[in-house]
Image: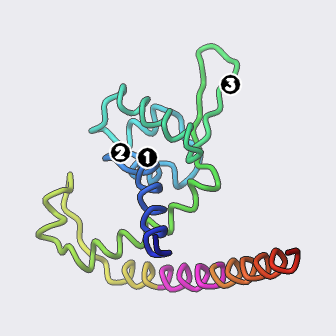
Amino acid sequence: MTKNDDFWRWIEAALNVIGGKWKLLIVIALRDGTQRFSEISHKLPAISERMLVKQLREMEHDGIITRKVYPVVPAKVEYSLTQSGEKLIPVLKILGIWSIIYLGSDVAGKGLSEPVKVDPGKLRQLLEDLDGILQDADKKIKRQSNRTSQTISINSGKN
């Protein structure tokens, strides 16, 4: 097994957590902060109530969202992104840029509930965000690589 195979297995594991038609749309619905069930449902009118409940439970189980129940009558339940869930926002921005650049309006438009136009200013901002995201990722990878190298050196010294 190569390191490259391991990388793709990590992607497979991530897709098992965030895959499906609704989960990333739920993340988008929660990106601006805490929401009640009815607010999420209103933002995603095409999802059935039963499916939304199922997806929210799975996302809570997987650590993507938190669910807070208030001890009041009638019941009050709020959902919000965890730190792991918030880290999906840059991934979604990258996916959005990819969609704009590679899918084009003819292909992407078929899957949309209403047509969208590409605003050059917003695209420029997304690309700037992407540059920052990639720089941050590069720094984190280098730090992690240094930690791994140090751990290997320390472990090698113990033998």
Quarter-of-image position of residue 133: bottom right
Q: Which is closer to the viewer, label 1 or label 3?
A: 1
- Span of residues in magenta: 128-140
Q: Tell me if residue 136 comes above or below residue 85 in the rendering.
A: below
Task: Tell whether label 2 touches label 1 (CB within 8 Å).
Answer: yes
117 sits left or right of 123 in the view: left
Which circle's residue, 3 or 2, is located before the other in the chain? 2
At mark 3, the secondary structure is: strand
Task: Between residue 10 and residue 51, name the one nearer to us.
Answer: 10
Q: Is residue 156 magenta?
A: no
Task: Between residue 159 and residue 72, name the one nearer to us.
Answer: 159
Q: How much space separates mark 3 and mark 2, taking CA atoms?
A: 26 Å
Look at label 3 and name its amino acid. Tyr
61 sits left or right of 11 in the view: right
Q: Which residue is mark 2?
A: 22
Q: Tell me if residue 84 comes above or below residue 151 in the rendering.
A: above
Look at label 2 and name its amino acid. Trp
Residue 137 image offset from top left, x and y in percent: 58, 79
Residue at x-position 36% and y-position 80%: 123
Circle number at residue 26? 1
Q: How much space separates mark 1 and mark 2, taking CA atoms?
A: 6 Å
Q: Which residue is mark 3?
A: 70
Give the overall secondary structure of the magenta segment.
helix
